[in-house]
């Protein structure tokens, strides 16, 4: 029986992993032979959620095999964030909440993007639309995804729909949203065992902006100064990444999950664009962006506009 | 009060005009200040539907004015088919049933594409999802759109959802689907007063295929030979269009609405690709494509693949 593979973006975060698992569950219940997959390692935050609700991580894939009929993308659409052979496969569906860019198909498809804070919020709606009840485990995964993407409902990307879905799903999952949410975020913000390279790659995305190629990596932390104690090592690693990937800019965003600010480090020929985009002055490549926690809503649009000038 | 403008593609067909009118009606009923617009002339087929149900054509616009806050695209997403200053405006939503290509945004949006035969079928669902009843006039417009895009349910693009919506809407509109549908198609297929240039532009779309720029014009006819009686004039006009727009291929598709075949005329450096794409031999630039009625499903994918080689 032909198989449909469902996966989120590279450098998977909790929304990407949990949405792939949940949508595969929904598709299976609707009679589609669907399997979840992932394009990278499972973060501590995601692993905390998976362990808490007793769900196994999806299979890791490097590319889509030829026995796969269709793929479904969740939580992304830009090809450079997807599987390497994305141009060789048939994309049947996309469920996403990001901007649309560097995406195209030969044929019509089911494409559903909504300007909400989390893919899981859309999936929660789709269970309802299809009259399929959300199980305790799936509710746990979906609420974890919302907590992760919204920094416990504090990100400006978070909409009323996300808030309503989060409380509803927490109840189905049998957890207290605030207690469970903070526990999960703190599990993810434990960076003590990470190498510098891991910090720079664990949630990194590449964007085409104007003619520039920009990579933005983000990590959540309880204490940003602990990370920047290793700034020299960070700078050396980034220089290598810029060279390997021919980037115009690498932006490292360390988000303080308690104060909801971000301490950024910008490196590359596009440093100037960062200063212009945010009206800041970099000091030793770094700057504090007050109240900035969302790569998608508070970083990517400003930079895209600046590089497009 | 800030205004949202809703429009379909250039060289508007019945689905594009009727979907803009219907979605503006739905948005207004949901409290949004939305106005429908159109990017080109109203065809005879569309005018027949508008007159039958007593609805005025939307305003014609050449570009989006600066007082417009947001735009909503219906029945298209490719920028080259949209308003000329599309890159300067904020796209809040897209409701469509075509492939996705040459489309991008800086920020997340509501994007809803479904692989159905007609945008109107999606809009009919959206009325239901929002609990807004469809009026007799709007039902008339929506069923006209489905009849037009599906050639009275005969096109391979037509899905069960389109068929169900068509019968339901015909009932609300108070018309017999077959009788009304054929009358409307025949009104549109009356090409007796058209100049050759009008035939080539009334429903023409430009596509990016590989590195090639391809324009495909389609007309419905009751007797295709009547049109090709003017082949010399057609060839002369197409040569001028190819020169003006720097096209690699112009494909003229004359669809026989009674037999459901198409007689095509291919011109330009990409003629060879047409022969390859359909496994045919052009004779005096022309060929009969048996059973081919859908530009979207039976022409664009084959050509895109051929030009991508």
Image (cartoon, coloured by chain):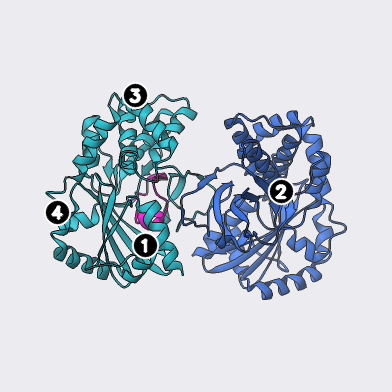
Chain colours: A blue, B cyan
Residue B226 numbered mark, or none:
4
4 vs 1, front mark:
1
Identify the residue under disc 2: A17
Residue B113 numbered mark, or none:
none
Mark with earlier residue (1, 3): 3
- Residues shaded magenta: B64-86
3 vs 4, front mark:
4
Give the residue at x 72% y 74%: A240
From the image, which quarter does the N terminus of chain B lie in? top left
Q: Chain of mark 2?
A: A
Q: Are marks 4 and 1 in contact (CB under 8 Å)?
A: no
Residue B278 numbered mark, or none:
1
Calculate the distance from the C-alpha at mark 1 to the C-alpha at mark 3: 41 Å
Q: Is residue A158 left or right of residue A45?
A: left
Identify the residue under disc 3: B172
Calculate the distance from the C-alpha at mark 2 to the C-alpha at mark 3: 44 Å
Mark with earlier residue (3, 4): 3
Q: Chain of mark 1?
A: B
Give the residue at x 34% y 71%: B272
1 vs 3, front mark:
1
Number of other residues with Cα within 10 Å of mark 2, as a class: few under 14, some 14 to 19, many 20 or more: many
| B246, above or below A3, in the image | below
1 vs 2, front mark:
1
């Amino acid at each position: 029986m032909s198989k449909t593979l469902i996966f989120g973006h590279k450098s998977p975060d909790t929304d990407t992993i949990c949405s792939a698992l949940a949508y595969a569950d929904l598709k299976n219940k609707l009679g589609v032979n669907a399997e979840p997959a992932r394009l990278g390692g499972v973060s501590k935050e995601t692993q905390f959620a998976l362990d808490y609700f007793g769900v196994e991580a999806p299979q890791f894939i490097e590319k889509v095999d030829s026995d796969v009929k269709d793929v479904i993308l969740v939580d992304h659409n830009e090809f450079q964030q997807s599987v390497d052979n994305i141009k060789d496969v048939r994309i049947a569906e996309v469920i996403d909440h990001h901007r649309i860019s560097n995406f195209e198909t030969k044929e019509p498809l089911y494409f559903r993007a909504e300007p909400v804070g989390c893919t899981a919020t859309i999936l929660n709606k789709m269970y309802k639309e299809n009259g399929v009840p959300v199980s305790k485990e799936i509710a746990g995964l979906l609420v974890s995804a919302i907590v992760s993407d919204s920094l416990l409902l504090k990100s400006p990307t978070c909409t009323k729909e996300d808030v309503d879905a989060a409380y509803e799903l927490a109840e189905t999952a049998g957890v207290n949203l605030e207690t469970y949410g903070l526990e999960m975020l703190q599990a993810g913000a434990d960076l003590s065992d990470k190498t510098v390279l891991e910090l720079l790659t664990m949630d990194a995305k590449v964007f085409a902006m104007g003619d520039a190629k920009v990579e933005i990596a983000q990590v959540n932390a309880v204490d940003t100064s602990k990370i920047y104690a290793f700034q020299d090592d960070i700078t050396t690693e980034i220089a290598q990444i810029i060279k390997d990937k021919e980037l115009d800019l690498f932006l490292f965003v360390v988000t303080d999950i308690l104060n909801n600010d971000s301490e950024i480090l910008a490196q590359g020929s596009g440093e100037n664009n960062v200063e212009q985009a945010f009206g800041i002055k970099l000091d030793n490549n770094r700057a504090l962006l007050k109240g900035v926690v969302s790569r998608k809503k508070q970083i990517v649009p400003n930079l895209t506009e600046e590089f497009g000038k």
